[in-house]
Amino acid sequence: MVFCCICDTANYDICIYLISDLFLERHFFMTEKTIFEKILHGEIPCKPLYEDEYTLAFHDINPQAPVHILVIPKRKIINVANSNESDIEQMGRVLFTAKKVAEISGIAKTGYRLIINNGDDGGQTVYYMHCHILGGRYLSWPPG
């Protein structure tokens, strides 16, 4: 079965995001769950560093710094560009969780970088919004 990754319907004919061409470019159907959805559904094991009702934080499997943690919302948001006003609280919770996790991980005092990649050119490889927390060393600028 194929589900819309914005409105979560399996019925292409009633998907509200097909009503106008304005939404058509933001709408696409996915046949597979993202790795983050598989983690949230228990299909891929994960050792959470932090978890609450709204977010989950865990170590990145390909760390780019001594501390590299991901924070994901438990309710799917594709990315910042595809967010809307109903996502404001969830997006804020991701950032607040990043603050908590930085404190738990011991990098809050020395500093850390938060990264949310958006779209192909922004380096987004998993189309499920997530926040990278990088720290544990000096992070030069500009990145990439």
Image: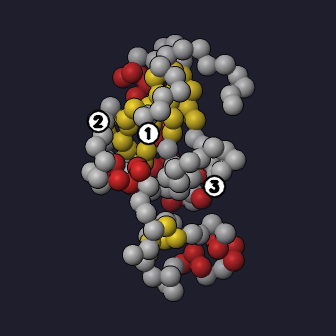
Residue at 46% x, 50% y: name it: 90
Check disc 1 and give the amino acid type. Val
Q: Are marks 3 and 2 in contact (CB under 8 Å)?
A: no
Q: Earlier in the sequence, mark 3 or mark 2?
A: 2
Q: Mark 2 sits on what residue? A: 47
Q: How much space separates mark 3 and mark 2, taking CA atoms?
A: 29 Å
Residue at 42% x, 34% y: name it: 61
Please identify the quadrant where the N terminus is shown: bottom left
Q: How much space separates mark 1 and mark 2, taking CA atoms?
A: 13 Å
Q: Is residue 16 above or below residue 34?
A: below
Disc 1 residue crowd, few under 14, some 14–19, many 20+, Cα 10 Å: many
Q: Earlier in the sequence, mark 1 or mark 3?
A: 1
Q: Position of residue 141 (x, y in %)?
A: 70, 22
Residue at 45% x, 82% y: name it: 11
Q: Mark 3 sits on what residue? A: 81
Whether residue 33 is visible: yes
- Mark 2: which secondary structure? loop
Residue at 67% x, 69% y: name it: 25
| Image position of 41 (left or right of 19) | left
- Count the marks: how many? 3
| Image position of 22 (left or right of 105) | right
- Mark 3: which secondary structure? helix
Check disc 3 and give the amino acid type. Ala
- Mark 1: which secondary structure? strand
Q: Which mark is residue 2?
A: none
Disc 2 residue crowd, few under 14, some 14–19, many 20+, Cα 10 Å: few
Q: Position of residue 86 (x, y in %)?
A: 51, 59
Q: Is residue 77 above or below residue 68?
A: below
Q: Position of residue 100 (x, y in %)?
A: 40, 29
Q: Mark 1 sits on what residue? A: 71
